[in-house]
Image (cartoon, rainbow, N blue to C red):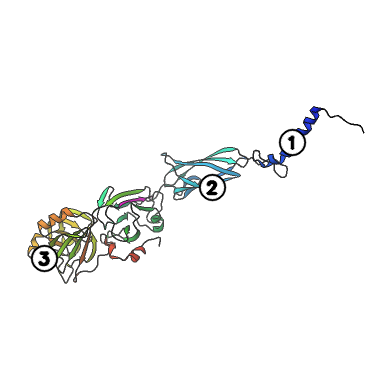
Amino acid sequence: MQRIRVPALARSGLRAAGAAALLAPLAACSGGTTPPPADGGVADDRPAVVSVAPEGRRVTAGEPVEVTAERGSLTSVTVTDAEGGRLDGRFSADRTSWISNRKTVPGAAYRVTAATRSKGGTAGTRRASFTTAEADKVNKVDWRPGTGTTVGIAQPISLVFDHPVENRAEVEKQLEVTTSNGTEGSWGWMRDWSGKDRVDWRPRTYWKPGTRVTLKAELNGTDSGPDGGWFVRDYSTDFTIGDRQVVRVDLDEHELTLVRDGSTVRRIPVSGGTPGGDKRSWRGTTVLMAKEGTINMNSETVGLGDAYNKMVDWSMRLTWSGTYAHAAPWNARYLGNANRSSGCIGMSDADARWLYGQVRPGDPFEIEGEDTKGTVAPNNGFGEWNLSWDAWQRRSALR
Protein backbone atom coordinates (compact mmCIF):
# COMPACT_ATOMS: atom_id res chain seq x y z
CA MET A 1 0.00 0.00 0.00
CA GLN A 2 1.31 3.34 -0.97
CA ARG A 3 1.66 5.71 1.94
CA ILE A 4 1.05 9.42 1.42
CA ARG A 5 2.87 11.80 3.61
CA VAL A 6 1.04 14.95 4.72
CA PRO A 7 3.25 17.89 5.42
CA ALA A 8 3.17 19.25 8.98
CA LEU A 9 1.86 22.60 7.78
CA ALA A 10 -1.07 20.89 6.03
CA ARG A 11 -1.85 18.79 9.12
CA SER A 12 -1.89 21.95 11.16
CA GLY A 13 -4.39 23.52 8.71
CA LEU A 14 -6.69 20.49 8.93
CA ARG A 15 -6.73 20.62 12.71
CA ALA A 16 -7.55 24.33 12.59
CA ALA A 17 -10.37 23.70 10.11
CA GLY A 18 -11.74 20.93 12.33
CA ALA A 19 -11.64 23.13 15.40
CA ALA A 20 -13.40 25.90 13.51
CA ALA A 21 -16.10 23.47 12.46
CA LEU A 22 -16.63 22.41 16.09
CA LEU A 23 -16.77 25.98 17.35
CA ALA A 24 -19.10 27.27 14.65
CA PRO A 25 -22.35 26.28 16.44
CA LEU A 26 -21.13 27.94 19.65
CA ALA A 27 -20.36 31.17 17.84
CA ALA A 28 -23.82 31.18 16.31
CA CYS A 29 -25.41 31.07 19.80
CA SER A 30 -23.14 33.56 21.48
CA GLY A 31 -25.08 36.73 20.61
CA GLY A 32 -21.86 38.49 19.73
CA THR A 33 -23.01 39.03 16.15
CA THR A 34 -26.39 39.51 14.50
CA PRO A 35 -27.35 36.42 12.48
CA PRO A 36 -28.45 36.97 8.91
CA PRO A 37 -32.18 36.80 8.15
CA ALA A 38 -33.54 33.27 7.69
CA ASP A 39 -34.41 34.03 4.09
CA GLY A 40 -30.86 35.02 3.32
CA GLY A 41 -31.74 38.72 2.90
CA VAL A 42 -30.18 41.79 4.47
CA ALA A 43 -30.97 42.69 8.14
CA ASP A 44 -33.65 45.46 8.50
CA ASP A 45 -31.66 48.48 9.67
CA ARG A 46 -33.97 51.17 8.38
CA PRO A 47 -34.35 54.11 10.83
CA ALA A 48 -37.17 53.92 13.35
CA VAL A 49 -40.29 55.88 12.36
CA VAL A 50 -41.52 58.25 15.12
CA SER A 51 -45.00 59.79 15.46
CA VAL A 52 -45.84 62.67 17.81
CA ALA A 53 -49.33 63.68 18.92
CA PRO A 54 -50.69 66.27 19.09
CA GLU A 55 -49.23 68.02 16.07
CA GLY A 56 -49.88 71.28 14.28
CA ARG A 57 -50.67 74.84 15.34
CA ARG A 58 -53.30 75.98 17.86
CA VAL A 59 -54.40 72.44 18.71
CA THR A 60 -56.84 71.92 21.58
CA ALA A 61 -55.10 71.74 24.95
CA GLY A 62 -55.86 69.31 27.76
CA GLU A 63 -54.36 66.13 26.26
CA PRO A 64 -51.11 64.34 27.12
CA VAL A 65 -48.24 64.24 24.63
CA GLU A 66 -47.79 60.81 23.03
CA VAL A 67 -44.71 59.61 21.14
CA THR A 68 -44.60 56.23 19.34
CA ALA A 69 -41.88 54.39 17.40
CA GLU A 70 -42.17 51.81 14.60
CA ARG A 71 -39.32 49.58 13.38
CA GLY A 72 -37.42 50.34 16.58
CA SER A 73 -37.60 51.71 20.12
CA LEU A 74 -37.35 55.00 22.01
CA THR A 75 -34.23 55.56 24.06
CA SER A 76 -35.24 58.98 25.41
CA VAL A 77 -37.99 61.58 25.03
CA THR A 78 -37.83 65.25 26.07
CA VAL A 79 -40.79 67.63 25.91
CA THR A 80 -40.23 71.30 26.81
CA ASP A 81 -42.32 74.45 26.64
CA ALA A 82 -41.22 77.96 25.68
CA GLU A 83 -40.31 78.79 29.29
CA GLY A 84 -38.05 75.77 29.61
CA GLY A 85 -40.49 73.73 31.67
CA ARG A 86 -40.51 69.99 31.04
CA LEU A 87 -43.30 67.45 30.79
CA ASP A 88 -42.20 64.25 32.46
CA GLY A 89 -43.61 60.97 31.22
CA ARG A 90 -43.32 57.21 31.13
CA PHE A 91 -42.33 54.55 28.57
CA SER A 92 -44.24 51.42 27.69
CA ALA A 93 -42.62 48.14 28.70
CA ASP A 94 -41.14 47.60 25.21
CA ARG A 95 -40.17 51.29 24.88
CA THR A 96 -42.10 51.69 21.65
CA SER A 97 -44.28 54.45 23.15
CA TRP A 98 -44.08 57.29 25.67
CA ILE A 99 -46.86 59.39 27.23
CA SER A 100 -46.57 62.52 29.35
CA ASN A 101 -47.81 62.50 32.95
CA ARG A 102 -49.34 65.99 32.62
CA LYS A 103 -51.64 67.40 29.97
CA THR A 104 -50.81 70.24 27.63
CA VAL A 105 -51.93 73.71 28.71
CA PRO A 106 -53.63 76.44 26.67
CA GLY A 107 -51.58 79.06 24.84
CA ALA A 108 -48.29 77.17 24.97
CA ALA A 109 -45.58 76.10 22.51
CA TYR A 110 -43.95 72.69 22.89
CA ARG A 111 -40.81 71.08 21.41
CA VAL A 112 -40.38 67.31 21.35
CA THR A 113 -37.04 65.52 20.94
CA ALA A 114 -37.12 61.72 20.66
CA ALA A 115 -33.95 59.58 20.46
CA THR A 116 -34.45 56.17 18.83
CA ARG A 117 -32.71 52.92 18.02
CA SER A 118 -33.64 50.87 14.98
CA LYS A 119 -34.03 47.09 15.06
CA GLY A 120 -30.61 46.85 13.52
CA GLY A 121 -29.09 49.04 16.21
CA THR A 122 -28.80 52.36 14.41
CA ALA A 123 -29.40 55.47 16.55
CA GLY A 124 -31.59 58.33 15.36
CA THR A 125 -33.27 61.54 16.50
CA ARG A 126 -36.69 62.95 15.69
CA ARG A 127 -37.72 66.53 16.51
CA ALA A 128 -41.20 68.02 16.37
CA SER A 129 -43.09 71.05 17.68
CA PHE A 130 -46.68 72.17 18.15
CA THR A 131 -48.70 74.96 19.78
CA THR A 132 -51.96 74.95 21.72
CA ALA A 133 -54.86 77.37 21.35
CA GLU A 134 -55.44 80.11 23.90
CA ALA A 135 -58.16 79.58 26.51
CA ASP A 136 -61.45 81.35 25.73
CA LYS A 137 -62.19 81.52 29.47
CA VAL A 138 -59.92 80.99 32.49
CA ASN A 139 -61.15 79.42 35.74
CA LYS A 140 -59.48 80.44 39.00
CA VAL A 141 -59.52 79.11 42.55
CA ASP A 142 -59.79 80.68 46.00
CA TRP A 143 -58.62 78.28 48.71
CA ARG A 144 -58.43 77.81 52.46
CA PRO A 145 -56.47 77.47 54.66
CA GLY A 146 -53.50 79.61 53.69
CA THR A 147 -49.97 78.32 53.30
CA GLY A 148 -47.91 78.00 56.46
CA THR A 149 -50.83 78.46 58.85
CA THR A 150 -51.72 76.53 61.99
CA VAL A 151 -55.43 75.73 62.20
CA GLY A 152 -57.91 73.95 64.43
CA ILE A 153 -58.88 70.29 64.37
CA ALA A 154 -62.06 70.83 62.31
CA GLN A 155 -60.57 72.91 59.47
CA PRO A 156 -61.33 71.45 56.02
CA ILE A 157 -59.44 72.19 52.82
CA SER A 158 -61.83 74.32 50.77
CA LEU A 159 -61.61 75.36 47.10
CA VAL A 160 -64.10 77.83 45.59
CA PHE A 161 -64.08 78.26 41.80
CA ASP A 162 -64.68 81.47 39.85
CA HIS A 163 -66.70 79.64 37.17
CA PRO A 164 -68.89 76.51 37.12
CA VAL A 165 -67.16 73.12 37.18
CA GLU A 166 -69.01 70.55 35.11
CA ASN A 167 -66.07 68.17 34.73
CA ARG A 168 -65.94 67.54 38.46
CA ALA A 169 -64.39 64.09 38.25
CA GLU A 170 -61.54 65.35 36.05
CA VAL A 171 -60.89 68.23 38.42
CA GLU A 172 -61.02 66.04 41.53
CA LYS A 173 -58.46 63.64 40.01
CA GLN A 174 -55.93 66.48 40.02
CA LEU A 175 -56.33 67.22 43.74
CA GLU A 176 -53.83 65.35 45.93
CA VAL A 177 -53.88 65.59 49.73
CA THR A 178 -51.00 64.13 51.73
CA THR A 179 -50.71 64.05 55.52
CA SER A 180 -47.93 63.22 57.93
CA ASN A 181 -49.92 60.38 59.50
CA GLY A 182 -52.11 58.94 56.74
CA THR A 183 -55.32 60.70 57.80
CA GLU A 184 -58.41 59.31 56.09
CA GLY A 185 -60.54 61.88 54.31
CA SER A 186 -62.67 62.62 51.26
CA TRP A 187 -63.61 65.40 48.85
CA GLY A 188 -67.19 66.62 48.73
CA TRP A 189 -68.81 68.99 46.20
CA MET A 190 -71.40 71.64 46.98
CA ARG A 191 -72.72 75.04 45.94
CA ASP A 192 -70.99 77.65 48.07
CA TRP A 193 -73.00 80.27 49.96
CA SER A 194 -71.80 82.72 47.30
CA GLY A 195 -73.46 80.62 44.59
CA LYS A 196 -70.16 79.36 43.18
CA ASP A 197 -69.04 75.74 42.84
CA ARG A 198 -66.95 74.52 45.75
CA VAL A 199 -65.17 71.34 46.83
CA ASP A 200 -63.95 70.61 50.38
CA TRP A 201 -61.73 67.86 51.79
CA ARG A 202 -62.47 66.90 55.39
CA PRO A 203 -61.10 64.07 57.52
CA ARG A 204 -63.38 61.27 58.66
CA THR A 205 -63.05 62.60 62.22
CA TYR A 206 -61.38 65.68 63.64
CA TRP A 207 -57.71 66.06 62.75
CA LYS A 208 -55.05 64.75 65.13
CA PRO A 209 -53.06 67.67 66.63
CA GLY A 210 -49.66 68.15 65.01
CA THR A 211 -50.70 66.67 61.66
CA ARG A 212 -48.92 68.27 58.70
CA VAL A 213 -51.07 68.58 55.60
CA THR A 214 -50.20 69.36 51.97
CA LEU A 215 -52.51 69.97 49.01
CA LYS A 216 -51.22 69.82 45.43
CA ALA A 217 -53.86 70.88 42.92
CA GLU A 218 -52.24 70.16 39.55
CA LEU A 219 -55.03 71.81 37.58
CA ASN A 220 -53.00 73.50 34.84
CA GLY A 221 -54.34 72.20 31.52
CA THR A 222 -57.63 70.87 32.95
CA ASP A 223 -60.91 71.85 31.28
CA SER A 224 -63.61 72.59 33.87
CA GLY A 225 -66.43 72.34 31.34
CA PRO A 226 -68.35 74.36 28.72
CA ASP A 227 -69.17 77.31 30.99
CA GLY A 228 -66.15 77.13 33.26
CA GLY A 229 -63.10 77.49 31.04
CA TRP A 230 -59.57 76.21 31.53
CA PHE A 231 -57.30 76.17 34.53
CA VAL A 232 -53.97 77.70 33.54
CA ARG A 233 -51.98 77.24 36.76
CA ASP A 234 -51.43 74.82 39.63
CA TYR A 235 -52.24 75.54 43.26
CA SER A 236 -50.76 74.29 46.51
CA THR A 237 -50.97 74.90 50.22
CA ASP A 238 -49.57 73.35 53.37
CA PHE A 239 -50.62 73.80 56.97
CA THR A 240 -50.37 72.26 60.43
CA ILE A 241 -53.06 71.21 62.91
CA GLY A 242 -52.86 72.92 66.31
CA ASP A 243 -54.11 71.96 69.77
CA ARG A 244 -57.18 69.80 70.23
CA GLN A 245 -59.68 72.33 71.48
CA VAL A 246 -63.45 72.38 71.12
CA VAL A 247 -65.89 75.15 72.00
CA ARG A 248 -69.16 73.69 73.30
CA VAL A 249 -72.24 75.93 73.44
CA ASP A 250 -75.33 74.81 75.36
CA LEU A 251 -78.13 77.20 74.43
CA ASP A 252 -80.50 75.66 76.96
CA GLU A 253 -78.01 76.21 79.80
CA HIS A 254 -76.82 79.54 78.31
CA GLU A 255 -73.21 78.47 78.71
CA LEU A 256 -70.10 78.23 76.53
CA THR A 257 -67.28 75.86 77.52
CA LEU A 258 -63.76 75.81 76.09
CA VAL A 259 -62.32 72.28 76.23
CA ARG A 260 -58.64 71.69 75.45
CA ASP A 261 -57.13 68.21 75.22
CA GLY A 262 -60.20 66.83 76.97
CA SER A 263 -60.05 69.20 79.97
CA THR A 264 -62.32 72.16 80.65
CA VAL A 265 -60.40 75.42 80.47
CA ARG A 266 -63.21 77.88 81.20
CA ARG A 267 -66.99 78.23 81.29
CA ILE A 268 -68.56 81.46 80.04
CA PRO A 269 -72.16 82.68 80.46
CA VAL A 270 -73.73 83.49 77.08
CA SER A 271 -76.98 84.46 75.43
CA GLY A 272 -78.04 82.84 72.15
CA GLY A 273 -80.70 83.58 69.56
CA THR A 274 -84.19 84.63 70.68
CA PRO A 275 -86.60 81.64 70.62
CA GLY A 276 -89.62 81.34 68.40
CA GLY A 277 -88.61 83.07 65.17
CA ASP A 278 -85.95 84.05 62.66
CA LYS A 279 -83.62 85.25 65.42
CA ARG A 280 -83.04 81.75 66.74
CA SER A 281 -79.50 80.34 66.60
CA TRP A 282 -78.32 77.45 64.45
CA ARG A 283 -77.39 74.16 66.08
CA GLY A 284 -74.82 71.58 65.09
CA THR A 285 -71.10 71.81 64.47
CA THR A 286 -69.82 75.07 63.06
CA VAL A 287 -66.16 75.91 62.47
CA LEU A 288 -64.46 79.17 63.36
CA MET A 289 -63.90 80.72 59.94
CA ALA A 290 -62.09 83.90 60.91
CA LYS A 291 -61.35 86.25 63.80
CA GLU A 292 -62.58 89.59 62.49
CA GLY A 293 -62.08 91.88 65.48
CA THR A 294 -64.33 94.94 65.54
CA ILE A 295 -66.87 95.00 62.72
CA ASN A 296 -70.14 96.65 61.81
CA MET A 297 -73.13 94.31 62.14
CA ASN A 298 -76.26 95.32 60.25
CA SER A 299 -79.29 93.07 60.57
CA GLU A 300 -80.53 94.11 57.14
CA THR A 301 -77.66 92.16 55.56
CA VAL A 302 -79.03 88.92 57.02
CA GLY A 303 -82.71 89.56 56.37
CA LEU A 304 -83.74 90.80 59.81
CA GLY A 305 -84.93 94.29 58.91
CA ASP A 306 -83.71 97.14 61.13
CA ALA A 307 -83.23 95.12 64.33
CA TYR A 308 -79.66 96.39 64.81
CA ASN A 309 -76.82 98.33 63.20
CA LYS A 310 -73.82 98.65 65.50
CA MET A 311 -70.07 98.15 65.88
CA VAL A 312 -69.29 94.86 67.61
CA ASP A 313 -66.00 93.90 69.30
CA TRP A 314 -64.14 90.58 69.43
CA SER A 315 -66.12 89.12 66.52
CA MET A 316 -65.51 85.46 65.60
CA ARG A 317 -67.29 84.33 62.41
CA LEU A 318 -68.99 80.91 62.47
CA THR A 319 -71.21 80.93 59.35
CA TRP A 320 -71.63 82.79 56.06
CA SER A 321 -75.22 83.58 57.06
CA GLY A 322 -74.01 85.90 59.84
CA THR A 323 -73.58 83.80 62.96
CA TYR A 324 -70.78 85.07 65.22
CA ALA A 325 -69.53 84.63 68.74
CA HIS A 326 -68.79 88.15 70.02
CA ALA A 327 -68.96 90.68 72.83
CA ALA A 328 -72.53 91.74 73.63
CA PRO A 329 -72.43 94.11 76.63
CA TRP A 330 -75.91 95.47 75.72
CA ASN A 331 -77.27 92.01 76.60
CA ALA A 332 -75.55 91.84 80.00
CA ARG A 333 -78.72 91.06 81.96
CA TYR A 334 -79.44 88.01 79.78
CA LEU A 335 -75.95 86.46 79.78
CA GLY A 336 -76.20 83.07 81.43
CA ASN A 337 -79.97 83.52 81.93
CA ALA A 338 -81.89 83.75 78.64
CA ASN A 339 -81.47 83.70 74.86
CA ARG A 340 -82.17 87.23 73.60
CA SER A 341 -79.73 87.80 70.73
CA SER A 342 -80.48 88.02 67.01
CA GLY A 343 -78.88 84.62 66.45
CA CYS A 344 -75.27 85.12 67.55
CA ILE A 345 -73.54 83.82 70.69
CA GLY A 346 -73.05 86.88 72.88
CA MET A 347 -70.91 87.28 76.01
CA SER A 348 -69.32 90.00 78.12
CA ASP A 349 -66.48 92.17 76.82
CA ALA A 350 -64.00 90.50 79.17
CA ASP A 351 -65.05 86.97 78.28
CA ALA A 352 -65.14 87.72 74.55
CA ARG A 353 -61.65 89.24 74.72
CA TRP A 354 -60.34 86.17 76.54
CA LEU A 355 -61.97 83.67 74.17
CA TYR A 356 -60.78 85.61 71.13
CA GLY A 357 -57.21 85.17 72.35
CA GLN A 358 -57.63 81.41 72.91
CA VAL A 359 -59.27 80.14 69.72
CA ARG A 360 -57.94 79.85 66.19
CA PRO A 361 -59.63 79.40 62.77
CA GLY A 362 -60.55 75.76 62.35
CA ASP A 363 -61.67 75.22 65.95
CA PRO A 364 -65.11 73.56 66.11
CA PHE A 365 -68.02 75.25 67.90
CA GLU A 366 -70.46 72.48 68.83
CA ILE A 367 -73.83 74.13 69.45
CA GLU A 368 -76.83 72.36 70.97
CA GLY A 369 -80.27 73.50 72.07
CA GLU A 370 -83.95 72.73 71.72
CA ASP A 371 -85.33 75.88 70.09
CA THR A 372 -83.13 76.58 67.04
CA LYS A 373 -83.52 77.28 63.32
CA GLY A 374 -82.13 73.83 62.50
CA THR A 375 -78.75 72.31 61.70
CA VAL A 376 -76.09 74.35 59.93
CA ALA A 377 -75.92 73.39 56.22
CA PRO A 378 -72.64 72.09 54.75
CA ASN A 379 -72.16 75.21 52.60
CA ASN A 380 -72.97 77.70 55.40
CA GLY A 381 -69.40 78.18 56.51
CA PHE A 382 -67.86 74.75 57.10
CA GLY A 383 -70.97 72.87 58.14
CA GLU A 384 -69.96 69.58 56.52
CA TRP A 385 -69.30 68.10 59.96
CA ASN A 386 -73.08 67.79 60.35
CA LEU A 387 -73.15 65.07 57.66
CA SER A 388 -72.39 61.43 58.42
CA TRP A 389 -69.17 60.05 56.95
CA ASP A 390 -71.09 57.99 54.37
CA ALA A 391 -73.18 60.99 53.34
CA TRP A 392 -70.06 63.11 52.98
CA GLN A 393 -68.25 60.54 50.85
CA ARG A 394 -71.20 60.38 48.46
CA ARG A 395 -70.54 64.00 47.56
CA SER A 396 -67.25 63.02 45.89
CA ALA A 397 -67.36 63.04 42.07
CA LEU A 398 -65.24 59.87 42.05
CA ARG A 399 -67.67 57.74 44.06
Circles 3 and 2 in contact, beta carbons < 8 Å? no
Left/right of residue 57 with respect to residue 284 in the rendered view: right
Above or below 188: residue 77: above
Magenta region, residue range: 208-221
The amino acid marked with disc number 1 is Ala
> SS for tag 2?
strand
Q: Is residue 313 visible?
A: no
* Residue under numbered circle 2: 97
Q: Nearer the viewer, residue 132 or 45?
A: 45
Q: Is residue 154 magenta?
A: no
* Residue under numbered circle 3: 336
State the CA–CA distance, disc 2 to disc 1: 46 Å
Q: Nearer the viewer, mark 3 or mark 2?
A: 3
- Which residue sits furthest right? 1
State the image coordinates of residue 378 (x, y, percent, origin top left). Answer: 28, 63
Q: Nearer the viewer, residue 118 or 18?
A: 18
Q: Nearer the viewer, residue 53 or 267?
A: 267
Q: Quadrant of the C terminus?
A: bottom left
Q: Considering only order in the chain, which callout, 2 or 3, is on the residue closer to the N terminus?
A: 2
Q: Residues within 10 Å of mark 1 (few under 14, many from 20)?
A: few
Q: Is residue 208 visible?
A: yes
Task: Give the residue displayed 13% in from the left and 57% down from the top.
Answer: 352
The amino acid marked with disc number 3 is Gly
* Residue under numbered circle 1: 19
